[in-house]
Image (cartoon, rainbow, N blue to C red):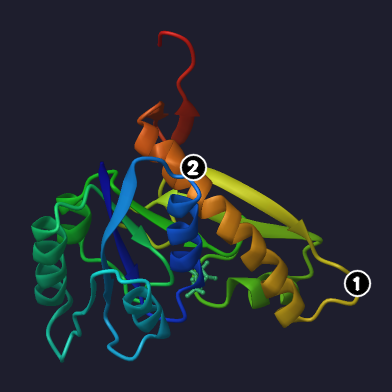
Amino acid sequence: MHNLGILLSGRGSNFIAIADAIDSGIIPNTQIAVVISNLASAPGLAAARQRGLNAIAIEANGRKRQEHDAEIIACLRDQQVDLVCLAGYMRLLSPGFIEAFPQRILNIHPSLLPAFPGLDAQLQAFEYGVHVTGCTVHFVDEQLDHGPIILQRSVPVLEDDDPHTLAARILEQEHLAYGEAIARVLSGNYKIISRRYLPKTGDQ
Ligand code: GRF
């Protein structure tokens, strides 16, 4: 059985999509061991409790990032988490966090990286005037929205879009992409060569 740890700061729709993907067997042999938020008021934390999951607020309370992260790492270890999924977690991870879970932290970002990293990616894409955007699930490394890409899904930008309609279209794809990417990573059936995520085939 795989144990996921989810980190979130907001509404948690990606967390809910992951939980649904586990329930429906898209992510097999897996449970959510813990949902952690840096904000006690995050609606995603309440949603996790409603589903009967172990949901914990670990707030920074003015501590340095490293100290705050150390408490989160201890909690994830305590719950025997083998894959950490960032799902709208609005804090940068310290290098120590990344070292504690090498190639075991995933993030979802609402653009086709490397375009539009950082905040408000959907608005950035809309204002730039791209005709195609989407979402990216990637491994987390020490740079923001940067690690090896596991999968991407694209959406068109339509003539009558506004930033909200575009973000909603991307979000639908995020919900499909995250479960699929988690299942792929947990299968272990891949290799990473330099930055490239490559599925393993045959007896490689
Ligand atoms: C999503 O757009 C995700 O791509 C980004 O933050 C947002 C979180 O939304 N990293 P939700 O809390 O999962 O609904």
Where 168 falls versus 33 (above or below)? Answer: below
Decide if ligand 1 comes within 8 Å of the CB at mark 1: no
Q: Can you identify the residue that label 2 sits on?
A: 150
Q: Secondary structure at mark 2?
A: strand
Amino acid on which disc 2 is placed? Ile
Locate residue 173, reporting x and y percent: 64, 58
Q: Residues within 10 Å of mark 2 (few under 14, many from 20)?
A: many
Which quadrant holds residue 163?
bottom right
Q: Is residue 113 visible?
A: no
| Residue at the image position 42 percent from the left and 58 percent from the top | 107
Q: Secondary structure at mark 1?
A: loop
- Residue nearer the viewer, 6 or 30: 30
Q: Can you identify the residue that label 1 sits on?
A: 159
Amino acid on which disc 1 is placed? Glu
Q: Going by the image, does 121 lie left or right of 94?
A: right
Which quadrant holds residue 7?
bottom left
Instruction: State the separation of the CA atoms marked 1 and 2.
Output: 30 Å
Between discs 1 and 2, the one toward the N terminus: 2
Quarter of the figure with the N terminus: top left
Locate residue 166, reporting x and y percent: 74, 72
Q: Residue furthest top?
A: 203
Q: Is residue 109 visible?
A: yes
